[in-house]
Amino acid sequence: MKIRLRLKEILTEKGISQRELARRMGIRHPTINHLCSDSVDRVYIRTLEQICETLDITVDQLLFRLKTKCFQINRIKKKQVNHEGI
């Protein structure tokens, strides 16, 4: 499942750069840059915890869950079945 982090938005709200967050967390800037992209396939739980601790936010504030293509396809198929009366 793909996830989207609101990290870029939260950093902007707090006036913190990606480089500054990486420095505070003691990790590489490219890692933070990747996490600020549109969506990621995986991220370590510990990294999420570190981000939340550093920014004083909750995991709920950080995460958006994206629907998978499989879920969307099943939903479309279900609509077709309902419309066809099958």
Image (cartoon, grey):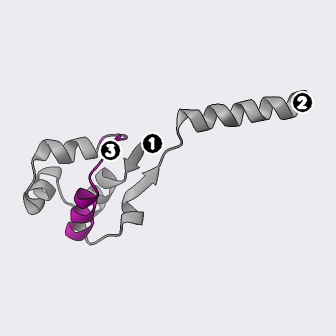
Q: Which badge, 3 or 2, comes first in the chain's sequence?
A: 3
Question: Alpha-carbon distance for marks 3 and 1?
Answer: 8 Å
Question: Alpha-carbon distance for marks 2 and 1?
Answer: 30 Å
- Residue sitting at 52 percent across and 38 percent down? 68
Q: What amino acid type should be assigned to the residue bearing mark 1? A: Met
Which quarter of the rendered picture does the N terminus lie within? top left
Q: Which badge, 3 or 1, comes first in the chain's sequence?
A: 1
Q: Residues within 10 Å of mark 3 (few under 14, many from 20)?
A: few
Which quarter of the rendered picture does the C terminus lie within? top right
Give x and y (percent) for residue 5. 36, 51
Q: Which residue is mark 2?
A: 86
Q: Which residues are magenta?
A: 37-54
Q: Residues within 10 Å of mark 2 (few under 14, many from 20)?
A: few
Instruction: Please state which of residues 21 and 66 is positioned toward the viewer in this rendering.
Output: 66
Q: Which residue is mark 1?
A: 1
Whether 68 is drawn above or below 16: the answer is above
Give the left or right position of residue 79, taking residue 63 as reference. Answer: right
Whether 6 is drawn above or below 14: the answer is above
Give x and y (percent) for residue 75. 69, 37
SS of the residue at dot 3? loop
Query: Quick check: is 52 in the magenta stretch?
Result: yes
- Quarter of the rendering containing residue 73: top right
State the mark number for residue 42.
Answer: 3
Give the left or right position of residue 26, taking residue 71 as reference. Answer: left
- Residue sitting at 40 percent across and 56 percent down? 63
SS of the residue at dot 1? loop
